Image: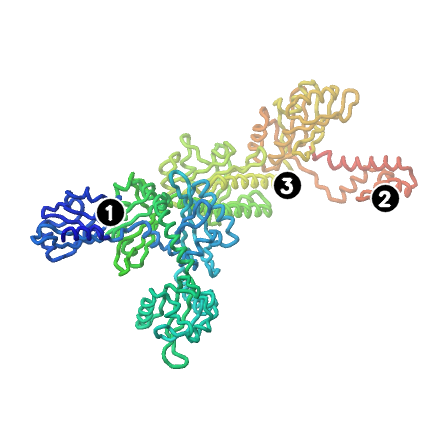
């Protein structure tokens, strides 16, 4: 009977109980024990205790512990996790052959411990964008209660100006299953905006997105101060503001006699405040629920004894018998009348919150398993010594280990060898244990040995007594984010350098305007470049008769490196400056000390002098190359593609400036060099057309068009001008042809061409004095400055048209004529009537725009007919135009 009674008691007990014999075999296990061990009572009978429990003692220790009714720590494996048990041992029969083990399970460290322990906010939204779960930090930071959060839209927690971006991020996460990051502000209940970085990842169940899981991290570093301030304000507002509820003052006596009750009492209890103040209704006896009266009294007295405020949640009965939950906060105050201490506080209805909390707990239980499946974050637990005790799908995806492989392994497995040698893992745990949380970024190692850049947060988990239970570790793969930030920083640096270079090039170009000679241009360019902190040395050179390059101007200090380059050049290696002149293309060497094409001794010399990269750009205008600009820099890869393009523009601008100086010198010179060339290239229009027409062609003049082409006026003799025009229409470079005059086999033809030998002459800094061709043989006479490099000029023409041969070279003096002599010469070419007509038209404003007088009005003033006026005026204008154009615009 007694055994039957004991068995019945054990079966009904909610505590797990296992009975073993002296051989350690299980002879009995109740239902609670079977549940704890994830089995059934029948299956447990006959098994051995050491197989069920880690830490089961040997027989002697077991017997001694049972006699002393001692407690032992045991652990078991359940669902892949370790569970800690406390085991109380008792002798079950008189001879001590059976021992009863009473088991008590310690709460395992689970994902919910991790989530609630996080210093970040954590939340889960369903597919309809409703809050389904959040951690305690979320409520603490925002100031909202759980019931309020459950009814709110997520966009209410970000500023209005960021809500479109937040909505788009949520939609993208739910629809495209991507991880989204948003930097905004977390808006609290009080309206405060706290800078936060939010990250969201899709929440997948059975292959279907059912919501998203998000985290938010305070990036303001002022969170603690704000939290403390907000908590202080919240408590003050609880006592002083007119929130739904009631403010009271009462004596500290059983029944809580009230001396003051606010108007909120009616809505809270259904009683008028006056009835409670007069004592008709006792708060302690009539309002407080009978089951909570003693508990409330003891809690208040204990708090007052410790000098603390009291904070309570309990039930009340309203006037119509309804049970409600209320939250009360109060403190002791000096009595106004009796001098005895009174109590003052605030009471509010929290019935809905309690119900909401109950519903939320159910929802959290349902979503807990889904959180475990998040794969964008590695969320797992460590024991106090740093060994892994739990593992989620995100950890498996990021780190590559399956649960069975990594459980019970030390978390230093994820660190690099250098970090392990430097005790970084131990320091991270120590920091977390000391400060509550440790955050770190650095390289971590996957199972396959590959590395990834990780952001790691380790949070210490402690029980109510402050004992360390373990650590929550959250890892996020930041490799792509870090690489993206690195590329952006590099692009910003390159753009800043490019802006400085472009500004330098603009300053160099502006300095060319003031230069009066080629030497001044070259010196200004070199000095501007060398004086900047972007380049070390710059020089300008030109090709000599041997084909090598000689220095014309230089600035900066390269330790004589350019001379070493000149000495090293030969048949086996062509220096970049020569290559630039030969190809008319910019040449760049980005790393001279390590350049395999350079001689070894030259590369070593560059490294010793701190020269890392170089550039050579030709100085060209049209088809003429005036030299080469060479620049050295102390930076490796100093000349990017865009930077080299800027130097191309500089080279063309310097070439243009040199050409302009040479042409100006030619126009102002008292004496010039006259060069005569024979031209047999049929690509020259005059040679081609004279051969096909067996005629003589003379270039009367050329005029540039607005489209960049050249209009030629060609005098024809020996053939019908119409035939020459027909021949010209077949030439690919001719864009327009017209017959100006045709007089019995002679005449004038206008021909517009896209390329011309005249252009090559002008680009070389010379001018055309005369050009003619007869039956396929051409003669060209040009004028150039006396100190012109004839070889270079002839080479430029030969590059443009083959078969250009220099026949003669001679100096020619230009007559010096004063302005008065020039005017007198012009006047002598006009008749008296022509001069009078021209002067009358000028003085009457005929040449103004708009005209002050018409031709008829001027003719009337001279008492001549309009036709006579036009005849005299046109002859005078032609004589003046002939004096200006006949000798210079060919």
- In the figure, 575 relative to 523: above or below? above
The residue mark sitting in front, 3 or 1, is 1
- How far apart, in angstroms, are the residues tagged by discs 3 and 1? 106 Å
Number of numbered labels in the structure image: 3
- In the figure, 747 relative to 319: above or below? above
Residue at which label 3 appears: 664
Secondary structure beneath label 2: loop
Closer to the chain start, of discs 3 and 2, is: 3
Residue placed farthest to the bottom in the image?
A: 338
Q: Are marks 2 and 1 in contact (CB under 8 Å)?
A: no
Residue at which label 1 appears: 35
Q: Position of residue 292 (x, y in %)?
A: 34, 65
Classify 10 Å Cα crowding around label 1: few (below 14), some (14-19), many (20 and above): few
Residue 611 seen in render? no
Task: Give left or right: position of 284 versus 32.
Answer: right
Q: How is the image coloured?
A: rainbow
Q: Position of residue 698 (x, y in %)?
A: 70, 26
Q: Are marks 3 and 2 in contact (CB under 8 Å)?
A: no
Pick the quarter of the image with the C terminus: top right
Q: Position of residue 367 (x, y in %)?
A: 37, 47
Task: Give left or right: position of 813 versus 625.
Answer: right
* Camera-side residue of 222 and 26: 26
The residue mark sitting in front, 3 or 2, is 2
Residue placed farthest to the front in the image?
A: 1
Closer to the chain start, of discs 3 and 1, is: 1
Q: Position of residue 20 (x, y in %)?
A: 13, 48
Closer to the chain start, of discs 2 and 1, is: 1
Residue 355 seen in render? yes
- How far apart, in angstroms, are the residues tagged by discs 3 and 2? 39 Å
Task: Give left or right: position of 880 versus 772.
Answer: right
Residue at which label 2 appears: 853
* Camera-side residue of 219 and 113: 113
């Amino acid at each position: 009977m007694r055994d039957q009674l004991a068995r019945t008691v054990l079966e009904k007990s909610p505590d797990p109980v296992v009975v073993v014999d002296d051989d350690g075999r299980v002879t009995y296990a109740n239902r609670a024990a079977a549940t704890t061990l994830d089995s059934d009572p029948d299956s447990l009978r006959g098994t051995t205790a050491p197989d069920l429990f880690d830490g089961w003692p040997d027989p002697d220790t077991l017997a001694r512990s049972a006699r002393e009714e001692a407690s032992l720590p045991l652990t078991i494996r359940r669902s892949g996790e370790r569970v800690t048990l406390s085991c109380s041992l008792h002798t079950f029969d008189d001879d001590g052959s059976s021992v009863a083990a009473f088991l008590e399970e310690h709460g395992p460290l689970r994902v919910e411990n991790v989530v609630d322990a996080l210093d970040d906010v954590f939340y889960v939204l369903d597919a309809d964008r409703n809050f389904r779960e959040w951690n305690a930090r979320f409520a603490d930071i925002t100031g909202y209660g759980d019931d309020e959060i459950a009814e709110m839209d997520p966009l209410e927690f970000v500023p209005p100006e960021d809500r479109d971006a937040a909505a788009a991020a949520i939609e993208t996460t739910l629809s495209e299953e991507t991880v989204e990051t948003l930097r905004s502000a977390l808006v609290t209940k009080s309206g405060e905006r706290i800078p936060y970085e939010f990250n969201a990842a899709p929440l997948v169940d059975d292959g279907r997105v059912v919501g998203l899981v998000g985290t938010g991290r305070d990036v303001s570093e002022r969170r603690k101060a704000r939290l403390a301030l907000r908590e202080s304000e919240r408590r003050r507002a609880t006592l002083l503001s007119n929130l739904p509820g009631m403010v009271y003052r009462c004596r500290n006596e059983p029944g809580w006699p009230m001396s003051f009750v606010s108007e909120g009492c009616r809505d809270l209890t259904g009683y008028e405040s006056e009835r409670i103040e007069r004592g008709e209704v006792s708060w302690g006896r009539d309002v407080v629920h009978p089951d909570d009266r003693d508990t409330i009294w003891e809690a208040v007295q204990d708090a007052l004894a410790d000098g603390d405020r009291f904070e309570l949640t309990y039930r009340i009965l309203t006037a119509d018998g309804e049970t409600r939950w209320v939250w009360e906060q109060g403190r002791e105050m000096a009595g106004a009348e009796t001098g005895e201490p009174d109590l003052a506080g605030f009471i509010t209805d929290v019935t809905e919150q309690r119900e909401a909390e109950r519903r939320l707990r159910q929802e959290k239980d349902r979503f807990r398993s889904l959180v475990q499946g998040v794969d964008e974050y590695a969320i797992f637990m460590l024991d106090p010594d740093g060994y892994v005790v739990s593992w989620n799908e995100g950890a498996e995806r990021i780190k590559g280990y399956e649960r069975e492989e990594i459980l019970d392994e030390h978390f230093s497995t994820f660190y690099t060898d250098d970090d392990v040698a430097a005790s970084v893992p131990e320091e991270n745990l120590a920091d977390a244990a000391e400060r509550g949380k440790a955050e770190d970024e650095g390289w971590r190692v996957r199972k396959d040995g590959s590395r990834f850049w990780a952001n790691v947060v380790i949070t210490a988990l402690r029980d109510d007594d402050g004992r360390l239970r373990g650590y929550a570790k959250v890892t996020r793969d930041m490799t792509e984010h870090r690489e993206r930030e690195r590329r952006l920083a590099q692009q910003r640096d390159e753009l800043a350098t490019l802006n400085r270079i472009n500004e330098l090039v603009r300053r160099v170009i502006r300095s060319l305007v003031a230069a009066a000679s080629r030497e001044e241009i070259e010196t200004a360019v070199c000095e501007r470049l060398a004086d900047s902190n972007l380049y070390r040395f710059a020089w300008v050179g030109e090709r000599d008769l041997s084909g090598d390059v000689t220095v014309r101007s230089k600035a900066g200090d390269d330790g004589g490196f350019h001379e070493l380059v000149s000495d090293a050049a030969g048949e086996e290696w062509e220096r970049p400056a020569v290559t630039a002149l030969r190809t008319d293309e910019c040449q760049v060497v980005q790393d001279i000390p390590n350049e395999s094409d350079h001689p070894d001794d030259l590369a070593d010399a560059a490294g010793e002098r701190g020269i890392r990269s170089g550039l050579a750009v030709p100085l060209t205008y049209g088809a003429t190359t005036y030299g080469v600009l060479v620049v050295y820099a102390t930076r490796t890869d100093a000349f990017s593609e865009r930077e080299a393009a800027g130097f191309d523009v500089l080279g063309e601008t310097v070439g243009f400036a040199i050409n302009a100086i040479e042409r100006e010198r030619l126009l102002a010179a008292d004496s010039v060099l006259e060069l005569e060339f024979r031209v047999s290239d049929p690509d020259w229009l005059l040679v081609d057309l004279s051969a096909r027409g067996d005629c003589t062609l003379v270039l009367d003049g050329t005029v540039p068009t607005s489209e960049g082409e050249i209009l030629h006026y060609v005098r024809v003799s020996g053939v019908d001008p119409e035939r020459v025009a027909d021949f010209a229409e077949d030439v690919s470079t001719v864009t327009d042809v017209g017959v100006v005059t045709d007089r019995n086999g002679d005449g004038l033809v206008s021909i517009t061409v896209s390329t011309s030998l005249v252009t090559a002459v002008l680009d070389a800094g010379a001018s055309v004095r005369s050009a003619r061709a007869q039956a396929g043989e051409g003669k060209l006479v040009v004028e150039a400055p006396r100190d012109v490099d004839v070889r270079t000029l002839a080479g430029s023409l030969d590059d443009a048209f083959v078969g250009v041969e220099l026949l003669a070279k001679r100096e020619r003096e230009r007559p010096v004529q004063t302005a008065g002599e020039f005017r007198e010469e012009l006047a002598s070419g006009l008749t008296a009537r022509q001069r009078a007509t021209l002067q009358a038209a000028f003085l009457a404003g005929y040449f103004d725009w708009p005209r002050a007088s018409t031709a008829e009005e001027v003719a009337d003033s001279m008492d001549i007919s309009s036709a006579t006026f036009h005849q005299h005026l046109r002859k005078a204008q032609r004589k003046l135009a002939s004096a200006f154009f006949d000798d210079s615009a060919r």
